[in-house]
Structure formats: C-alpha cells, structure tokens
Amino acid sequence: MKNRITCHECKNEKCFVKQGCFGEWLNKISTNKFQHWYKKGDYIFREGEPIYGINFIQQGGVKVVTTSLHGREQIVRLAKEGEILGHRGLGRTAYYFNAVALMDSLLCFVENELFYEACMNCPKFAFNLIFFYASELRRAELRVKYQAQMNIREKVAMAFIYSYEAFGMNPETKMLNISLSRQDIADIAGTTAEQITRQLNDFENEKLIARNKRDIIFLNIKGLEDIVGDYKIE
C-alpha cells in the first residue's frame, strides 16, 4: 500500500468529512480510518458481504452494480472522488449490490460505530449527508422512470451524459476522464453490448462522438444533450 494520507493532508476538498467534521472529530476520523488502494477491476465489496462501515472515495472512480435474478448486471450509480459508498446498505447486515473500481482508486473506510458517532456530533456532516441521500435518491428514481420510456438512442445518449457529468472529460483530447467498455455503457444504459455498438456507429456517423480504441471522444456534447432534452435529471 502507498503512504497513508491523513485528513489534514488530503487535498480532496469535496470529501464529506473535510466539509463537515472539525477539530477533535476530524482528528478522530483521520486517526481511526482505514485506507485501501484498489486497482481497476477490483471489487471494493460484493453482494452478500457483511456491512461494517462506509467508504469515502479519496481518489478515483467506482461503479455500483446490481445483479438480476438471471445474472444480468446493471450499473445503478457512478461514484467519483469526494462521494461515499455503502450508504445504501445502512441498517442492513449485508450488501445487496457490488462496488467495482473503474480506475485505480484510493478509499477511506470508516467503521459503522465511528460513522454514527460523527453523524450525532457533527451537525454539518449529518446535514450534508442528508442532502446527498435525497439528491441521489431523486436522481436514481428519475433515471429508472425515464429509462423505461426511452428508446435505445436516448438510453445511450443518457449513459454518455451521465458518465460525462460524473467524471468530466479532458478539455484538450475531449475524452472522458475514465475508460468505459462497451459492456459498461450497456450496463448503464440498460441494454446490450451489441446494441451499444450499433448506436456508437450511428453517433459517429452523426459526428457526435469519435472513437480512439476504447476511448470515447465527445465531439458534440450539446448534440447528445439535445437527444435527451425532454428528460431532466437534476
């Protein structure tokens, strides 16, 4: 493992801990947290594993994946640095979803008891978490609602917009700041890799995107947004 980074040294100002915990509580979390590096493709936790605490993403990106009764996977959330993982399992004894690193990622793990104590003693920390929960729930519900109404073209455009909003893109190369496979895009869009391939070809012909091997180059973000202009997720 690489050198440990304390909360005071951490440069991630979006972290809920840094935004809402101060003084002794920031010191307490910094001292008692666990840090783990995960390589791309590593599971952070798996469906059915016991829940011992909350993960804070210090660096990197993660996909949260559910599996249907027939074994098909769907990406229900993309999480970036500054956000948390495992909160959907609070109050349960075991996870009912998987979390997988989309790139090399550094996560801070805070055990349940310390997390609950911080919520009780740091009002701003708890307040920020409540609003994050509410916002994430609203956005997730809208994605489910809209996905049932969308055609394939709209689903793939929405998957790209969601990925772009989550991780951004390199302003020079116009590439996403994360590499997504066709299957990843399909799992976000709720469709198949074969349908993704056909739609990518269409988008490429329309000069909305270009491809550099597995990387997607966004030539016209506004054009992709216009495709899903009737579906507002805020």
Image (cartoon, rainbow, N blue to C red):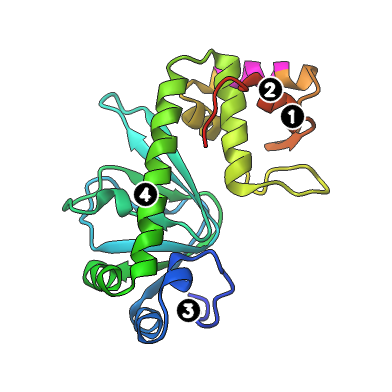
Badge 1: residue crowd in 10 Å (few <14, some 14–19, many ≥20): few
Badge 3: residue crowd in 10 Å (few <14, some 14–19, many ≥20): many
Residue at which label 1 appears: 222
Residue at which label 3 appears: 7
Badge 2: residue crowd in 10 Å (few <14, some 14–19, many ≥20): few
Q: Which of these two is toward me, 8 or 43?
A: 8
Circle 2: residue type: Asp
Residue at which label 2 appears: 226
Point out the tag, 2 or 3, that comes first from the N-terminus. 3
Q: Estimate the x, y position of residue 208 in percent, counting from the top left.
A: 76, 25
Q: Nearer the viewer, mark 2 or mark 3?
A: 2
Circle 1: residue type: Lys
Q: Estimate the x, y position of residue 39 in percent, counting from the top left.
A: 51, 58
Vertical comparison of 71 with 121: above or below: above
Tags 2 and 1 touching, CB below 8 Å: yes
- The quadrant where residue 212 appears: top right
